[in-house]
Each structure stands twice: as C-alpha cells, then as structure tokens.
Image: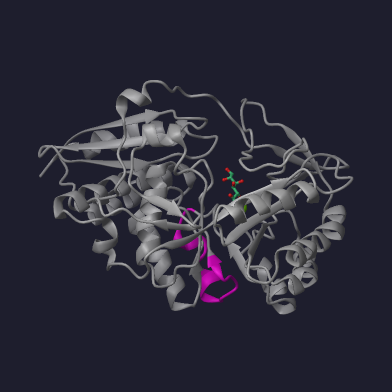
Amino acid sequence: MKITDAKVFVGGPGKNYVTLKIMTDQGIYGLGDATLNNRETLPATYLQDYLVPNLIGMDPRNSEDIWQFFYRGAYFRRGPIAMAAFGAIDMALWDIKGKIAGLPLYQLFGGKSRAGAMVYAHATGADLEDLMDSISYFVEQGYKAVRVQCGIPGMPSASYAVPEEKGASTSYMTDFSGIRPKVETWDTERYMRYMPGALAEIRARFGPDLKILHDVHHRLMPREAAEFARAVEPVGLFWLEDPTPAEDQAALRLLRQHSTVPIAIGEVFNSIWECNKLIEEELIDFIRVAVTYAGGITHVKRIVDLAGLHNVRTGFHGAPSHSPICMAAQAHLNAWAPNFGIQEYLVLGTPECDALFPSEHRMENGLVFVSDTPGLGVDFDEAEAARYSYKPGSHPVVRLEDGTLWNY
Ligand code: CS2
Ligand code: MG
C-alpha cells in the first residue's frame, strides 16, 4: 500500500482550520487536523513544503515509523508548529488504519472503557449575574460540568474568555481577528479578592453535584496560586486550570504544599517531555494536552499511559480552534482511556462545522458518544471547504496597569 498524494486545506467557519487529506493507491484516504490557533499557516507550510513530499510513496500502515521518521528526521525536535504538522499526519494514518481494519479507532486502542464520555461547556458572563444565567442554560442542556469565567468588578478590561457586554452568553467565543493583537489590562489583586467569593456563590446556587471548573489562564505567580487555591478549596472545584505559567513545572510544588484543589494543565504542551515531571511527581490531577498540539494519537497515547501510571486523568483541550477531526481523535481516546477524566467541548454539532466535517459522533446529556464508523468517523467536504479562506488572527496581549507585559 502506498501514499499517492496529500492535500492541505486552510479555512473553516470562524476558524482557519488546517486540514490534511492523505490519499492512497487503494482509494482509502485519511484526515488530520494541524490547526495551530492564530499561527495556522505555519504547520500548513511545514506540511506542504517539507512533509508531504516525503510522504508520497510511503506505506501508510507504518504509522509509528513515519512518526519517528519526521520527529527524529527534523533534528530540531518538538515545538508547536512541528508537532501540529506531525499530529495531522499521524491522525490521518490512524484514520486509514481504522478504515483498512473496518473498525472505529477506539477498538484498535483496546475497546470501550465507557459508553459515553463526560464533557464540559463554557459558561461565562460580563458579570456574576450573567454567568449564573449562562450556567443555568448549560445545566438545562444536560451538562454535568461547566467551566465558569466572569468579569471582575473594576478590572481595567474584560479578562480571559469574558464578554465585554452584558447579556447572558451561551455561545461566547473569543474574537482573535486581526494580525495586531488586542491589548488587555490585568490586575491580579482584584481577581484574587473577587473570584473565590464568586465561585462560592456559584456552588451555593447550583448545589454540590455540579462539576465546576475554572481557568486561571496562567495569570498567577506560584505564591499567589498557592494562596488562591487555598481560598477556593471550600468550593470543591472539579479542577483549577493553568494557575501558573506552564513552562515552570516546579511552580506547582508550592501550591501542592498548601492545597488539595485538583489541578489541570497541559493545553500548551507539545510533547511528553514538557509534562513528564509534572505527572511523575503527581503535581497535577488532569493532563490537558490536545491531539493536534501534542503530535497526534501515537504520541498522546504515550502521555495518557504515563499519566495512568501516576493516577493522573485526561482532560483533553477542546477549544474552538480544534477542528472536528482533532475532536474525533480525542473522542476515540476518551472512549478507550482507562484514566479518562473529562473532555472540553465546543465545536461538534454546529451546522457549519457539520457541513464541512460530516460525522456521526454525537453529544447528548453532557456526554459524547463515539461513532462506530471505521477510522476516525469524520469526513471532509472539499466543495464546502472552497467557501472558506484564511483570515489572520492573533491572541490578545495582556499588560499589568503599570504596562508590564503579562500572560494572556
Ligand atoms: C483555553 C483556550 O479552552 C481553554 O482552556 O485556555 O481556549 C485557549 O485560550 C486557546 O486555545 C488559545 O488559543
Ligand atoms: Mg485553558
């Protein structure tokens, strides 16, 4: 069996999805996602200029050898751009493998460990009142878990994933459009004074069963994170996410000494070498890598297995910048993983995405049910793709009130 061609598409509804399609001499094709949010053209170019020319003629069934060929062959290893490009190839090769076998991928991983996988929605509000309405909306939709973000009174500008305007927000998405980043102003003290009380009010309002998640989004220093984690301990959060900048794996030791709040980290990690210490020292409770950003199914399965040895559960990243192809790969891993925790969930099910990426994966009552279609179980409509083109975007830049550059 030989790879005969591969095409890279950039574009999609509201997002510059980078979709790879690998074709073979037996008419079977595979799909992969290489969407690196706000840097999409880079993995696309890496694929087109360096990787696709090498793929032609290779045997797609040798996915491990092909992964090693590109990972070690790059000499300069890792990094978000390369791992997103390798990740797309790897997803497409596993898709082909499942189609050859006539089996959905979770069967090739070891079968199902659960019927449906719990997901969480994004509740948010310009203020606590709006956030409460947003949470109610998702609870009514059957979600058992919600991530909660809200505006902080007196904060110079809207903080992470919070709308500027009032009005209950049930489908808020951060606007990244434009090549020049927006500049936001952040004040840690205001946040640390206000957020523990807001989280306590949410717990009081929705009772003990609702799983409440909160994303600090890398904004606290290790000592502040330890103090904040202790302050929110009584709320009984499902997890506190990215309390500190993720590069500093040691930052969590202080937090762990002062609090037992479950910690989730990993969305910015591109390889096992960025989180192995966190996992081996059991400084986290959930690993949040994404199949696209962390080198595909082959590499993420290694991270999941290492995590399982240390009682760390999965909490795969699922921001809207991950296409339904990445979400499908994660749906298969979530169905199989013995140490599954929860899945972030936004994209699947929107009409535009369904038209571009038809699939039978479904979400019901806060659970994702993986499709039994062979392979990834998601397709790609090239005619639909022609409707979309690349639009530049950038992450906001955050400064403290004195102008100091801070973490988005
Ligand atoms: C966030 C992301 O979903 C999350 O947990 O941290 O939405 C993140 O802000 C974006 O992926 C950045 O591109
Ligand atoms: Mg996050």
Residue occupying the far front of the picture: 140
Where residue 380 appears, as percent x and y from the top left, is: 31, 35
Q: Give the color scheme: rainbow, by chain, secondary structure or one colour.
A: one colour
The N terminus - image quarter? top left
Which region shows up in magenta? 270-286
Residue closest to the eye, 197 or 255:
197
State left or right for residue 61 relative to residue 401: left
Q: Is residue 68 visible?
A: yes
- As for residue 276 lying within the magenta part, the answer is yes
Q: Is residue 240 visible?
A: no
- As for residue 398 lying within the magenta part, the answer is no
What residue sits 74% from the left and 73% below the top? 233
Where residue 108 appears, as percent x and y from the top left, is: 24, 62
Where residue 368 appears, as percent x and y from the top left, is: 43, 56
State left or right for residue 37 relative to residue 34: right
What residue sits 39% from the left and 55% below the top? 331
Where residue 223 appears, as percent x and y from the top left, is: 78, 67
What residue sits 37% from the left and 65% below the top? 115
The C terminus - image quarter? top right
State left or right for residue 187 relative to residue 311: right
The image quarter in which residue 254 lies? bottom right
Residue closest to the eye, 79 or 215:
215
The image quarter in which residue 178 lies? top right
The mark total stands at 0
- In the rendered image of this protein, does residue 217 appear above or below residue 349? below
What residue sits 47% from the left and 38% below the top? 350
